[in-house]
Amino acid sequence: MIPEVVKNFLLQNKEKQGFFCLQLTNDLLIEHVYGKPQQLGLSPPKKGLKVLEVLPVFLPEMYNEEFEIPFYNLSEHSVCNIYFIKKHKENYLIFVDKSEIFQVTQKYQQFAHEDNISKNKFKRIAQELERAKQKLNKSNQEKATLIAMLSHELGTPLTSILGYCELLLEEDENNHNLQVIHRNSIYLQHLIENTLLFGKTEVDSMSTHIETINVEDFLGSLVDTILPAALEKDIFISAQSSEQGTINIDVTRTKQILINLLNNAVKYSNHGSVKICCHVSKEQYEFLISDTGIGIDVAQQNNIFNPWERVNKNDGKGSGIGLFISQKLAKAIGGQLQLKESTKNVGSVFQLLLPVKEPSVNHENKTPSQTICLQAKTLLVIDDDQDVLDLIEAFLEKTELKVITALSFLDAESILIKTNVDLILTDLNVGAAKAPTFLKELRNDKCDVPVVLMSAMPSNKAKQQFIENGFNNVMLKPFNHNQLLKTITTNI
Amino acid sequence: MSVAKKICLIGRFAVGKTSLVKQFIEKQFGEKYKTTVGVSISTKNLTVENKDISLVIWDIAGFEQDGHYAHYMRGVHGLIWVLDGTEPESFKILETINNSLPEIKQVPSVCFINKCDLVDEWVIKESEINSLKEFNYAVYKTSAKTGENVEAGFTKLASLLLSSL
Ligand SMILES: Nc1nc2c(ncn2[C@@H]2O[C@H](COP(=O)(O)OP(=O)(O)OP(=O)(O)O)[C@@H](O)[C@H]2O)c(=O)[nH]1
Ligand SMILES: [Mg+2]
């Protein structure tokens, strides 16, 4: 017979499941066992034994007061609530089976925790990704800024070097030493241009401008460009076309690619010949550049279009972005550039395939504008570099144009008050001041003289921005004699 | 007869409380996670500095909310705080529990920073571990997987309990 106290207690606590109960003396000896401990996987304890010898886990408990232990895991399969109650000088230790509800609770809790863990893990991965992305964006941004700044800085001295060199060559065109300086300056200019392109993200979305050009003239101009370098190494250069007549290509970009390839061909040959062929078909133009140079290792052939990958790492020539840029450019104009074949110490053949396209509609007035009369016109040039000012003056010496120079915007402003100016040519940064601010002030003062900006930042986006800001045009630095004249005549 | 002392493992879910007990008592480890509901109690006899002690180890389900420990911490003699070095959340809980049970500050305690075998996922910095010193716990970097510092940590608590006799 189960004692009334226990019955009442269970009733009060709404405990209906299977249970067993140990009645204990004040010395915690087992006086009586009610119910079936076997149901909970326990063998029935003998009367008279000390309960703590049977259940040592309750050894340190304090038995001076009642207590309750919910969800005590007896074993993997049986779980019970334990109650210790004291009534009328009797002590009862009651075990109520909770295995069933435990299973359900366990399942829910397991699910909730695992869900929490995987969500947390996912969150952390996402955070890490985000952090990495931001870091990457930041360093990309920094890189782009650095490249833009560097190019601007390099562009200014190069303008002077190239310009003065051209002036000297006009007087003494066969001076070999000058030719070498000139050629290397141009090479440096290409290098800077290529580096800039590398930093640009918009290469991929570059707009193309298809022009119609006589194929033999085009190939001839390529040969002319590369000839001095080839002659120096006794390399024979030849050009050949399968057809006569015209082709429709993006002349600037295609030239850039082919010059890059020809430069490489000469650079990596010590003798022999470099050949450029053009095969014209209905759908495409195929340009083949072959050399009898040192060739490319089979192992390296897959890497040559990666940035900063140089075919011969130790030769000290080239920056290793030429081919990367060329391939990017080829893609941008809808073409394809690849290494067709290469054999060590025999030579290499590169292939550029371009689709045949309709020429772009031309908005620009192509008639040579240099015939425009510059007489009685005044040009104001603003730059904080005296060398550049001198150079522009020297370039324009033989024209009828009147050239005034200013080393600061302040000087420029006082000149503008006194003098009638037809065109302003200004550097982007003059001292600490910026050209856009100057332009704004100018327009506020109702001065509508056209202003052309000189900048070494060639990105289309930046150029567009300058035009939107009100500049009439942007002239890229470095520039040569012809480019300067063209800019002046088209904007004056 | 040796003294019996009740010690409780407390901490966030999945930090490795059950695994630490299993490693300490059975020298075994399982990768599979089975969350503890309620409490699972086991005993282990130790001899520390020539004194015998019987540890009655209460492996309690991970902390859920205030009142979670009401039925389990009665008369506790020693505590093992278990944190997970790969889970920053498990550190926050230390503060929460201390606030909800101010009286446990008096209980001799050690702190395990568990899962130290997972070096790649380890996110807790030395400075954060040092900041635990304010709680005055002996801190152990443990691994229930490799057993690193598990015995040492439990033994440390046992010796704290013996010295407070
Ligand atoms: N690598 C590694 N895994 C561990 C370690 N300790 C525990 N785990 C794993 O972590 C998970 C959780 O371990 P448990 O011991 O069940 O965690 P708990 O603290 O008892 O969790 P609750 O009972 O839910 O509060 C399991 O998958 C274990 O295998 C450890 O030291 N190293
Ligand atoms: Mg557990």
Image (tube, coloured by chain):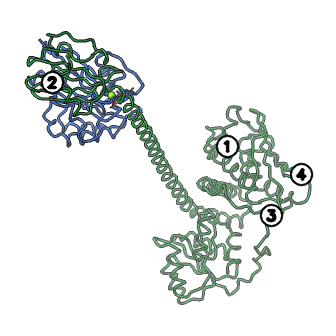
Residue kind at label 2, given as amino acid type: Glu
Which of the 4 quarters of the picture holds residue B30? top left
Q: Colour of chain B?
A: blue
Q: Colour of chain A?
A: green
In the displayed structure, does residue A388 sit left or right of residue A173?
left
Mark 4 vs mark 2, foreground winner is 2
Lower sequence index among marks 1 and 3: 3
Q: Which residue is mark 3?
A: A211
**Labels 4, 1: one chain:** yes
Residue kind at label 3, given as amino acid type: Glu
Mark 1 is surrounded, within 10 Å at the Cα level, by few (under 14), some (14 to 19) or many (20 or more) other residues, namely many
Question: Which residue is depicted at the point 44% across and 46% down?
Answer: A127
Mark 2 vs mark 3, foreground winner is 2
Give how far across and how far down residue A468 sits, in percent: 60, 74
Q: What's the distance in space between the residues labelled 2 and 1, CA to CA?
A: 77 Å
Residue kind at label 1, given as amino acid type: Phe
Q: Which residue is mark 1?
A: A305
Kind of element beneath mark 1: loop
Question: Which residue is depicted at the point 14% across and 23% down?
Answer: B161
In the displayed structure, does residue B97 sit left or right of residue A315?
left
Q: What's the distance in space between the residues labelled 2 and 3, CA to CA?
A: 96 Å
Position of A212 relative to B96 (above/below): below
**Labels 2, 3: one chain:** yes
Q: What's the distance in space between the residues labelled 1 and 3, CA to CA?
A: 27 Å
Kind of element beneath mark 4: loop
Closest to the observer: A362 or A410? Answer: A362
Q: Which residue is mark 2?
A: A61
Lower sequence index among marks 2 and 3: 2
Name the chain under label 3: A
